[in-house]
Amino acid sequence: MQSYRDGHLWMLRVEDGDDLFPALSDFARTHGVRAGAVLSGIGMVRSATLGYWNGQEYEPAELTEPHELVALHGSVAESDGAPSLHLHAGLADRRHRLLGGHLLRATIGILAEVAVEEFPGKVFGRPLDESFGLRRLDLDPGPTA
């Protein structure tokens, strides 16, 4: 992965064949990003899994053919001392139909260009909210980095 930083903004190039979640987690760990926003992402995925939250669990939809990554947004937090990502994506097929939802998994095809803004000195958490059965973003700054 290539990365470039300008102030609090990062531009990343995720490589062909990379699993997006470990790649972004490794980036966050390496650069100490414990609170951030994934502002945008474009590129290509070889395969992906989108999820729809039905109120109790994610209903997965497997995409086994390449799709254009036309939108990627989310947050970077920390859970149990490790990076925690929450991502949503818009993916277009060869007939220009758009599918979207909670991104559960994605393998990059060719590349992905991802913009991340970090909030230095902050730690966002992602504790389990028992009432929803989901880990929810906690913006309480927590300890400084």
Image: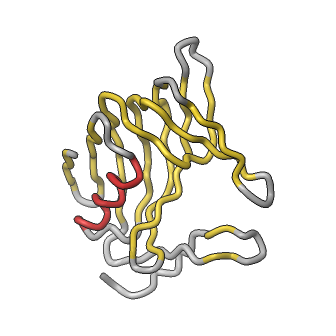
Q: Quadrant of residue 35?
A: bottom left
Residue depicted at 50% across the width and 46% down the height: 105
The answer to whether 96 appears left or right of 31 in the picture is right
Q: Is residue 100 above or below residue 83?
A: above
Q: Position of residue 15 (x, y in %)?
A: 26, 38
Q: Quadrant of residue 138?
A: bottom right
Most distant residue in the top direction? 95
Model colouring: secondary structure
Q: Position of residue 121 (x, y in %)?
A: 32, 78
Most distant residue in the bottom direction? 143
Residue depicted at 45% across the width and 85% down the height: 142
The answer to whether 59 appears left or right of 101 in the picture is right
Residue depicted at 62% across the width and 30% down the height: 99
Residue depicted at 32% across the width and 67% down the height: 33
Q: Is residue 98 above or below residue 55?
A: above
Q: Position of residue 128 (x, y in %)?
A: 63, 76
The answer to whether 58 appears left or right of 62 in the picture is right
Number of numbered callouts drawn: 0
Q: Position of residue 120 (x, y in %)?
A: 31, 72
Q: Quadrant of residue 61?
A: top right
Assign the C terminus to one quadrant of the image. bottom left
Q: Is residue 68 above or below residue 2?
A: above
Q: Nearer the viewer, residue 40 or 128?
A: 128
Q: Is residue 118 above or below residue 24?
A: below
